[in-house]
Amino acid sequence: MISSLPVVECFHSLQGEGAHTGRSAYFIRLAMCNVGCTWCDTKISWSADLHPKENIQKLSENTARARSKGASFVVITGGEPLHHNLNYLCKSIRNVTKCKRKNSIPIHIETSGVDKLSGNPDWITLSPKKHAPPKKEILKVCQELKVVIHEKDDLIFAETMAQEIQLNISNKTLLFLQASWNNKEAENLTFEYVKNNPQWRLSMQTHKWLKVR
């Protein structure tokens, strides 16, 4: 049984990206990532050795406390959260938050999809990378596909991912394109593509524009 996990930070804020933009959420950012995206804005999370291990029971209690203050859901992010087995963390969060209220808090996971799915989350945001494609099983079950656009080839990759999803499930997965931060060329590419391809939606990192966490 895993009793602790390396944690970069935990905080209560608003979801800044994707389908749940603007909603109150509690974030658990786990350390460790071997995907290595050049444009990553959380490179501090790549090494697990640089961050303390936090007790899972404590993480669950803190999540319950955030829920009592208005958090609609908890987001487990990273790093790459699925480098870790999340079964015990998610089970603990559900048990603790259910004790505080009738229903447990919804659990969202943000992942690149390179590892086996664990934790049985309520919402999966898949943000795949072309240099490290996701596992087929996660393509089949994600509720949200969010592809970061850094250059023109990323648009082709995004369409490939969307087609793979549509081959496996009904068209219920929400499709988002998000320009890499502070990249004007990527912003223009993304805006024009979404404007001309209405199956896609634009995701913006609103928390960065607002200068909040």
Image (tube, grey):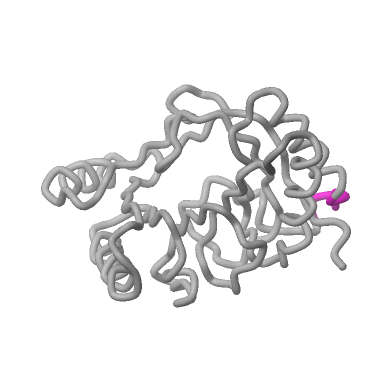
Q: Position of residue 107 (x, y in %)?
A: 62, 48
Q: Position of residue 105 (x, y in %)?
A: 66, 41
Q: Quadrant of the N terminus?
A: bottom right
Instruction: Please tell me which residue lies in front, 165 or 155.
Output: 165
Find out whether residue 31 is within the magenta segment. Answer: no
The image quadrant that residue 81 belongs to is: bottom right
Q: Which residue is found at the position 77% from the left and 30% from the top? A: 65
The image quadrant that residue 203 belongs to is: top left
Q: Position of residue 115 (x, y in %)?
A: 59, 72
**Residue most extreme to the front:** 102
Q: Which residue is found at the position 58% from the left and 30% from the top? A: 213
Above-or-below relation of 184 to 23 = below
Instruction: Please tell me which residue lies in front, 29 or 51.
Output: 29
Q: Is residue 39 left or right of residue 191?
A: right
The residues colored magenta run 50-56
Above-or-below relation of 200 to 98 = below
Q: Is residue 125 left or right of residue 203?
A: right
Q: Which residue is found at the position 55% from the left and 63% from the top? A: 36
Q: Is residue 91 left or right of residue 137?
A: right
Above-or-below relation of 97 to 81 = above
How many numbered marks, from 0 up? 0
Q: Which residue is found at the position 15% from the left and 51% from the top? A: 197
Above-or-below relation of 85 to 148 = below
The image quadrant that residue 70 belongs to is: top right
Q: Is residue 103 left or right of residue 162?
A: right
Q: Position of residue 82 (x, y in %)?
A: 63, 64
Instruction: Please tell me which residue lies in front, 197 or 132.
Output: 197
